[in-house]
Image (tube, grey):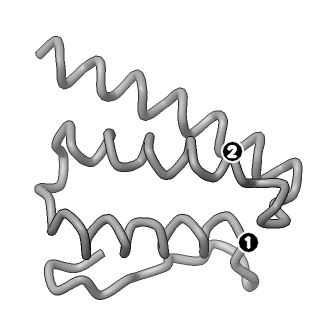
Amino acid sequence: MDEDGTIFILLHDTIAGCAAIFEEFAHAIQYEKRGNIAINSAEVCIREIEVAECLLEYGVKLGLTQQELDQTRTNLESYKDQLLFYKEG
């Protein structure tokens, strides 16, 4: 997301998965509620964790595929590890 709240979705495939679209909308809501944040900060990890947990909680209702849910779990663990790095360091 840009400093003015513009959402960018980088596609590596020709079709964006539902998870990617829902994730970016969730980040836009975070931006609207809590403002912009510095890149490479603990707050980035905190917001990514919040969104990943929400996607996992509501993923079936949102129609996410098993592959998207699995990738979200992997991403969640990665962000938790990164957050520990910021807290320790």
Q: How many marks?
A: 2
Amino acid type, callout 2: Glu
Q: Comparing marks 2 and 1, which lies closer to the viewer?
A: 2
Say which element carries label 2.
helix
Disc number for residue 57: 2
Compare residues 19 and 85 and report the one nearer the observer. Answer: 19
Q: Residue at x 69, y 78 (%)?
A: 16
Quick check: 46 left or right of 59? left
Q: Quadrant of the N terminus?
A: bottom left
Q: Position of residue 7 (x, y in %)?
A: 37, 83
Q: Quadrant of the C terminus?
A: top left
Q: Position of residue 61 (x, y in %)?
A: 82, 61
Q: Residue at x 65, y 45 (%)?
A: 72
Disc number for residue 17: 1
Q: Position of residue 35 (x, y in %)?
A: 15, 68
Amino acid type, callout 1: Gly
